[in-house]
Structure formats: structure tokens, C-alpha cells
Amino acid sequence: MKLQDYTKYLRLGIYVLGAFIVLFIVMNYMVMPSVVHNKETVEIPTVVNMPREDAFRLLDTLGLKPMDGGSRMDAKIKPGKIAQQNPLPKTLVRKGRRVYLVTSGGEEKVSVPTLRGKSIRDARFALERSGLLLGEIVFNPSDDYPAGTILSQEIAPQTSISRGVRVNVTVSQGTYSDRVRVPDLAMKTLKEALALLQSQNFTIGKISYEPTIEFPPNTVLDQYPQANELVPLGQSIDLFVSQKQVKVTEH
């Protein structure tokens, strides 16, 4: 190839490359920005706590594209309502932008474990592992379960309930043969009552004094548990005892 021909083709190539660069600059910095900026923009509305269908419909009417973002458990938002959105509300975007919506599944529920036959300690641990709490404990005699064993539970096993709920239980006090009758202590002196309780292996409970002028001091007025109740051996007995009433002299 002659030098003149080579130079000719080189110039042509330079012209083509220059034209391409100029075209790229014009398209990238002038034409495309003009097209993009002319595209209508819209502000993302707040759809959190709105029913899912209504949220999708609203976004559609604004020229946006609502997308299913899955679901999550949320105690503060009712099931079927929007719990989260992305982009956030008041974000300015172009029409056609995707908006991802997470739907609330409602409050998280847990299953109540089976407590019957467990000790109080094991029942407490089983409930806590499930996110629940041990509630009120009622004691009843039982010929089938040893003392300290769960006889029944207020909320049935496998019931689906909210976290943190307290489950009340009934616990065995042992067989009826393990129970003794509470002696009648009314009108006995405190000394006599204490001696009687100790002789029958009861535990002395709280002693409360009540001022009175009807009975001599240190007279047993009442008791808890009441006389003749059947209670476990070693049960503590509370006493209510008379105390001399102090007369107040008026000046």
C-alpha cells in the first residue's frame, strides 16, 4: 500500500472515531438526560398499616409497581395489613418504580406444652421455653399422682396463644391418706394452741394480734386453715389472737 493510501485511510478512521465520540457525548449528556428528566416523578405514599389490597391499588393508580415482599409476624399491625415498605414514604421516584411491600402476619402465636405429670419446676421450664409463664398454682389431693406433680392445666395442650400468657395449673398434694385434719384451736390459749400444733407436727404460721375487750389476752379467736380441714402433714397454721385493748383517756 502506498503512503498516500495509508494516510487516507488513517484520516478516515480518525474522522469516524471522532464522529462516534461526538455522538456518544451528545446522547449521554444531552439527549438521555432530557428524556429521563421529562419522565414524570411521583412521591411514594405511606401504605404501612393499610390493607394489602388497598396498598397495591393505590400504588397502581400512581403509576408505581407494587411487589410482594413476603410477610413477617408483627404484634402491632393486624394480619393482612402492610408492615413495611421499600422505598420509604415521601421518597421521590420516577413512575414505574418497584415498591416492595411486606405484609403483617399478626401477633406471633406459640403452642402450649403438655404439663400433666411434670413437676412444678419442669413445667415452669417447659412454659418458658415456649415463651409462656407459669401462672396460679392450685393444690388438690390425688390418688393417681404423687405430691408436687401437675394434675391439670387451665389452657389445653397444643392450644395456640400469644407469647407471655400465664398458664394456671393444678398440682397434686398427694393421696388423701397423706392428709391430716386441722385441730380446732378456737378459744384456746396461745400456749395451748402452739403445744397442740407442735404435737401433731403442724408448722406454726403467722400470728396476728387483734385488740379486744371481749376475750382474755392471748386467746385464739380464729385460724387458717379452718378447723377440721384436711391438709398435708406439716401444713402451716395461721392464728388470730386476742390482745388487750388499750383505752384512750380523753383530756
Image (spheres, rainbow, N blue to C red):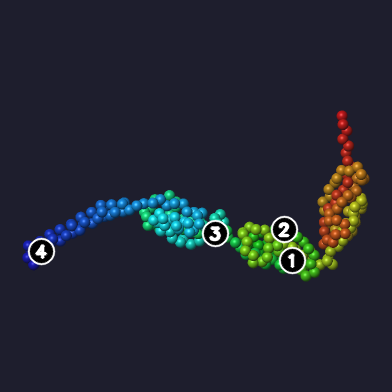
Residue 16 in sight from this viewpoint: yes
Q: CA distance from mark 3 to mark 4?
A: 76 Å
According to the picture, the residue beneath numbered tag 4 turns out to be 6
Q: Residue at x 88, y 41 (%)?
A: 245
Q: Nearer the viewer, residue 70 or 170?
A: 70
Q: Position of residue 18 (x, y in %)?
A: 18, 57
Ranked by sequence position, the earlier of labels 3 and 4 is 4
| Mark nearer the viewer, 2 or 4 | 2
Name the kind of residue labelled 2 in the image: Glu
Q: CA distance from mark 3 to mark 1?
A: 36 Å
Secondary structure category for the residue under label 1: strand
At horizontal 92% and vertical 44% (from top left) the residue drawn is 214
Residue tagged 3:
79
Query: Dividing the image into 4 quarters, which one contains the C terminus?
Result: top right
Rendered image quadrant of residue 182: bottom right
Residue occupied by mark 1: 151
User: Which residue was labeled with disc 2?
Assistant: 136
Kindly indicate the quadrant of the structure image that contains residue 26: bottom left
First reached walking from the N terminus: tag 4 or tag 1: 4
Residue in view at x 90 percent, y 47 percent: 218
Three-letter residue code for mark 4? Tyr
Three-letter code for the amino acid on which mark 1 is drawn: Leu
Dot 4: element: helix
Distance from disc 4 to disc 1, alpha carbons, whole Å, reads 104 Å
Q: Position of residue 172 (x, y in %)?
A: 77, 65
List x then y, in percent, for residue 204: 84, 54
3D distance between C-alphas at marks 2 and 3: 31 Å
Q: Which numbered disc flags the more N-terminal residue, 3 or 1?
A: 3
